[in-house]
Image (cartoon, rainbow, N blue to C red):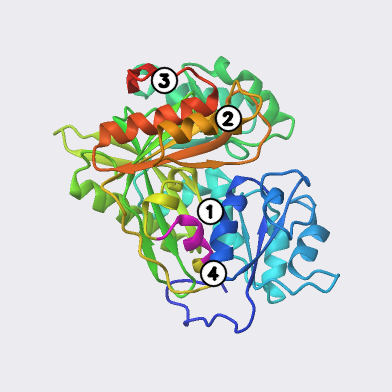
Amino acid sequence: MPETAHAPRTVTPRGPLTVAVVGGGQLARMMAPAAGELGVGLRVLVEDPASSAAQVVTDAPVGAASGEGAIRDLIAPSDGRPAATVLTFEHEHVPNALLTDLIAHGTPVRPGPHALVQAQDKIAMRRRLTELGVPCPRWAPLPTDPAAGRAALADFLAASTGGEAVVKTSRGGYDGKGVRVVSGPDDVADWFDAVAAGGPALLVEEKVPFTRELAALVARRPSGEVRTWPVVESIQRDGVCAEVIAPAPDLDPATDARAREIAVAVAEGLDVTGVLAVELFETRGADGSPQVWVNELAMRPHNSGHWTIDGAVTSQFEQHLRAVLDLPLGDTAARAPWTVMANVLGSHLEALTDALPELMARFPEARVNLYGKGIRPGRKLGHVNVSGDDLAEVRRRAVEAAALLRGDEVSTSSTIEEHA
């Protein structure tokens, strides 16, 4: 039976606690400090022994996230290591049938497969959110037959303001991948061909004339307790998050409350346990009042929540561990009036650490988090958090510190606009 807010209160097992995590990227890596502070064991299934998480987690067996044997051994190692208390994830690409079987045999899986499918499949997610009455852009699944799919897309575009819409692959997209703004069926002709060859189905959504992008982060434990962090503004460049401003500047209190209300409704309606990120569009209604619409979901710690590591009483990573272990959740209040996170997207340097002497000298308050990844153009290699009282200055210093890690020249008189 799925764990819900109305389920009987669960009791965390006594004795040593071990959280098993599927996925060896930066999200699992950033769980390690929180796990160490709490005295919780962390065991991470990594795809490669040089992966981001494997560099800092000592218990990091190598295996594929789709491998049944690897996941079963992650939970109950054959070499005598203690069995995991709970299984969780840093990405959604895990076979649901296996997770269902694990639950049937007594392993807590959080979030469960009945929730996780909504993050794996955008069509399933849109259908469920629509059923829950959550505000979403107008959308429709596209038929898998190429001719029927093209006709359905043409009809959708004909009813769209401006003659444009957004087509998405139902599975596998992230950081701008699997998303295209289209004005006609020919713009995704290759995707229709891929669907016919067995690729993921497509959906089309209204192109929302948003004023900015927001994100609401919520944590929920199996016994039903929920906590939300301040709603943040997410600034995207080329489909990838470049900056996060916490809290979102000039956010109407009613909109902040509405965004948090939506996040809680999604967490409870989908029975999510752990951290859930709800990405939102902010728009203006006909009367000029602000409105919010759900764009995407992530059932795990998320880029929009990295600011919490230094800017909130409880980080999203500690909170995720608390939640999946069904421990009381921590305070989510901000520690400073403003925190800005600036992502490091690619770099010209041979090693990002080459920039640390100058960065630390110029921005001693900056909190640097590097992910141990190989350098590639546009790749998320790390982030910088800066907190303070003056938003313009906090943002300038965060952006410039990240620029140094990219190997960019930063003059003492540079401005935010030069990096926009």
> Which one is closest to the eye, mark 3 or mark 4?
4
Residue assigned mark 1: 300
User: Distance between the Cα atoms at labels 2 and 3?
Assistant: 18 Å
Q: Is residue 317 magenta?
A: yes
| Circle 3 SS class | loop
Amino acid residing under circle 3: Glu
Amino acid residing under circle 1: Arg
* Horizontal arrangement in the rendering, residue 115 relative to residue 253 (left or right): right
Residue assigned mark 3: 164
Residue assigned mark 4: 38
As rendered, which of 17 and 236 lies closer to the eye? 17
Decide if residue 226 is in sight here: yes
**Point 67% across, 73% down: residue:** 107
Residue 324 % position (x, y): 54, 67
Tell me the magenta residue range: 314-321
| Circle 2 SS class | loop
Amino acid residing under circle 2: Lys
Q: Residue furthest left?
A: 287
Q: Main secondary structure of the magenta part?
A: helix
Q: Residues within 10 Å of mark 2 (few under 14, many from 20)?
A: few
Residue assigned mark 2: 177
| Circle 1 SS class | loop
User: Distance between the Cα atoms at labels 4 and 1?
Assistant: 19 Å
**Mark found first going from the N terminus, 2 or 3:** 3
